[in-house]
Each structure stands twice: as C-alpha cells, then as structure tokens.
Amino acid sequence: MKDGKITISDIANELGVSKTTVSRAISGKGRIGDDTKSRIMQYIEEHNYIPNVAAKSLAQQKTYSIAVVWPGDYNAVDLPFFQKCMFGINEITSDFGYDIIISIINGDNITSLKRIVDNHKVDGVILTRTMVDDIPAKYLKQSGLPFVVIGSTEDDDIVQIDNDHFDACREMTSILIAKGLKRLALLGGQSNHVITRTRYKGFVQGFKDNGLEPYDDLIYMDLDSDLKIETIINDILKKKIDGVICMDDNIAGKVLAICRANNIKIPQEMRVASFYNSSILENATPSVTSLNFNDRNLGAVAARSLLEIIDGRVVANQKLGNYEVILKESTK
C-alpha cells in the first residue's frame, strides 16, 4: 500500500483472492460468485478505493476520453454557442469518468482529428457543426469509431442531435406575418452550412402556413462581410420592406451597427429579428426579437447519446423542441 492508497493487488492479498477476481468485481464483467463480489465491493467501499484510470482503460479496452470537434473558422459570436454546448457535454462526461479532447478542424483539413483517431486516443467523437459535404463525418464513418453530430444531416446513418431549428424558424416567421409583416427580407450566412438551409426552409414554411410565398428578391445568402450587408440594407429600404429576419446573431449584430451608423431607426424605419440569440444581442439597443435555444442541454444530450453508443446501445436521432420565440422592441 503506497501513500495510503490501495491497489488491486492489496485488495486481492487482503481478501485471499486473485487480482483477476478483483478486476471482474470492479468491472462487472466475467464470472464471479455473488458472495465474493459482495466481499470485494464492501472492502472497496470501506477503504475508499479509486480505480486507476490507466489500468481501468487497459482492462476494459477504453480510453475514457472523447473528442469534441470545433470548426476552425468560428468567430467571437460563435463562441457562446460552443461554450454552452461544452458545459453540457462536460456535465455528462465527468459523471461517467470521461475526459474531453478538443480538436480544431480548418476547412477540409482533418489532420488533427485523424491523428487522434488513428492513435486510439478517444472512444468516440462529437462533431459540433454539420456541412453539406461533411468531410469529418465521412472520415468517422469509415473509421468505425462511435460519433454523433450536433446538427442535422441528410445521412440517415449518422446519429444527429439538434435543436428543432426548422420548426422554430417556421413559428417565428408565422408570428411576424400574423403581426402584418408580410414583405420580409431574409439575410443568411454560408449556404454550405446545413443550419443555413434548415433555417431557410423554416422561413419558407412560415409563409406557406399563411397561404403566402416569400419574395425571392428579398432573400440574400452568403453574407460574409459588413460591406455586403450595408449594400443590401440600402437596397431593401428602397423596396419598402416590412422587416428583416437575420439568420443568426452575428448578422443581426452587424445590421444593428450599420443602422446606427447610417441613422436608420429601428423599429420605426426597419424592423429586425434574428433566428438565433446569444449574449451578443442580450444588451442590444433596441432589444431584438429572437429565438432562444437551450444549447447547454443540446450538448448534454449529445454527450449522453455518444456514451450510450460507446456502450453498444442503439441511439435514435433527436430534435429538441425547447426553444422560445421572444418578441421584443425591434419588431414593434
């Protein structure tokens, strides 16, 4: 017994059993009598035995680590989403004795992910973004390693955990239309992101639910610069729109800044809403109508699903409906 810590050998010697028997009692695997198991577990409880992680990993052929993959092109406004997801993931993994390795992927370069997988450093992977042509997901499918994605994909073989963005965007669009805002412009991000396409479909469905069709000339995608957004705002103001829906808080924040710089009054001259809220918009003036999602819970559900897959259980896709449409000053 070293430094007051007992080992499997100490337990075996004290109880007159083999180390294999002690390991079987701890892992719950293999044949062992109920009385023997009871004696071992009682001894462990009385002496506060904590299994060595490395030995436990070797015995069960597990690393007790998972990888969480972040896209390298995330920016400051994306960070709150990833942070909340990570808090949720950590809540679950820590309860089951798992550690987290973060892997950053830049574009289609998945070298870091491949190194982690090829060197058997993790038992599973959580992807935090889905793409239309999803290179990381394709690689993980070929590797055979358990993984889940936070987001949605058309590949039914991949376990998907996502907020119900389609229904949320549909509902918000429908509510704004019911308020009389029928000439709505839509400002979107990268069209190769699955979330962008999902939000667009929800926007269109909101119009259809009200017997209407969106105006094609008021839909703008792939907005990756302030200059593009400023040009579009000047353009849509001439078209006598009723309001603007931004696909995310990043675009909404830029729209608010451009409107302030050009003395465009919100909501008097232009109403603004966002399909996603974060700390970026919490202190905005005026307050912005937006969709609120529980991203911490999203991360927790994804982590729980991955650990179930690692344990050999069958896991179904989940669409989480815990969202809120928050109507605020910007659309009055």
Image: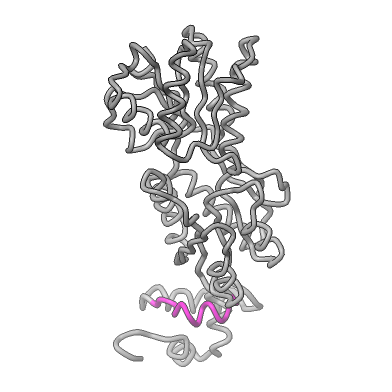
Q: Nearer the viewer, residue 229 or 317?
A: 229
State the image quarter where residue 208 is shown. top right
Image coords of residue 209 (percent x, y): 63, 14
- Residue at 56%, 25% (x, y): give it: 219
Q: Residue at (61%, 20%) from the top-left corner?
A: 216
**Quarter placement of the C terminus:** top left
Image coordinates of residue 155 in percent, x first then y, are 71, 48
- Identify the residue at horizontal 60%, vertical 54% (top origin): 148
Which quarter of the figure is the N terminus placed in?
bottom left
* Rendered position, 160 above or below 288: below
Q: Across the whole image, how many numbered discs are drawn on residues?
A: 0
Image coordinates of residue 37 in percent, x first then y, are: 54, 76
Residue nearest the viewer, comparing 247 with 10: 247
Residue furthest top in the image: 180
Q: Quadrant of residue 218?
A: top right
The image's colouring method is: one colour
- Residue 263 visible, this angle: yes
Secondary structure, magenta segment, majority class: helix
Q: Which residues are magenta?
A: 49-61
Nearest to the observer: residue 240 or residue 89: 240
Relative to residue 43, is residue 309 depicted above or below?
Answer: above
Does residue 184 belong to the magenta stretch?
no
Q: Residue at x 39, y 52 (%)?
A: 87
Front one among 290 and 189: 189
Q: Is residue 60 visible?
A: no
Horizontal side of 280 relative to 72 (left or right) equals left
User: Looking at the picture, how far across and down is residue 130, in whole percent?
Assistant: 59, 48
